[in-house]
Amino acid sequence: MKKVITYGTFDLIHYGHINLLKHAKQLGDYLIVACSTDEFNLNAKDKKAYFSYEQRKSLLESVRYVDLVIPENSWEQKINDIHEFKIDVFVIGDDWAGQFDYLRNEGCEVIYLPRTPEISTTQIKSDLNRNKKK
């Protein structure tokens, strides 16, 4: 069984997220999604998600491409996850291109998938804030 893992906050899940998850699943048989916890988002990423970790986890678990959702608690856990879950393929959006190449040394393939250009959670939040001010 070929196992794939991806990481992210997955707040305000939209079709760009679904595209990423669909393409990630096509690269293997079993897709694990590491969803950033609220604490990790706040302390390491300096951002606050609209939905709580538990809500985002529940949404991800309802996506047919996702087999397992685990918490992402730190930047450093990726190496441990690769070994613990016997990961074959690490997948992330191409806005991170080159930043996780070191994971190849852990025995897995690293793939940067193209983002869906016209959509992002940041853009959705910006649009909603702009419309709210009108």
Image: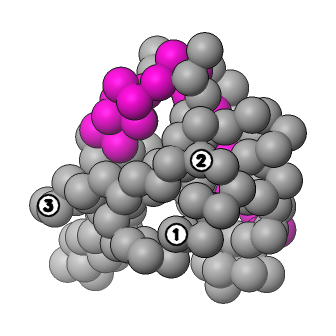
Q: Can residue 126 be seen in this view?
A: yes
Amino acid found under the numbered disc labelled 2: Cys
Q: How crowded is mark 1: few (under 14 residues within 10 Å), some or many (20 or more)?
A: some
Above or below: residue 50 compared with residue 58: below
User: How far apart in space, not on screen, are marks 2 and 3 (Cα)?
Assistant: 30 Å
Colour mapping used in the image? one colour
Magenta-span inclusion, residue 127: no
Q: How crowded is mark 2: few (under 14 residues within 10 Å), some or many (20 or more)?
A: some
Q: At which x and y percent is residue 131?
A: 23, 71
Which range of residues does the magenta coloring cover? 18-40
Q: What element carries label 3?
A: loop
**Could you tell which of marks 2 and 3 lies nearer the N-terminus?**
2
Magenta-span inclusion, residue 26: yes
Determine which quarter of the picture holds residue 36.
bottom right
User: At 65% across and 80% down in the image, what residue appears?
Assistant: 45
Residue that badge 3 annotates: 118
Residue that badge 1 annotates: 101
User: How far apart in space, not on screen, are marks 3 and 1 (Cα)?
Assistant: 26 Å
State the mark number for residue 108. Answer: 2
Q: Is residue 6 visible?
A: no
Determine which quarter of the picture holds residue 104.
bottom right
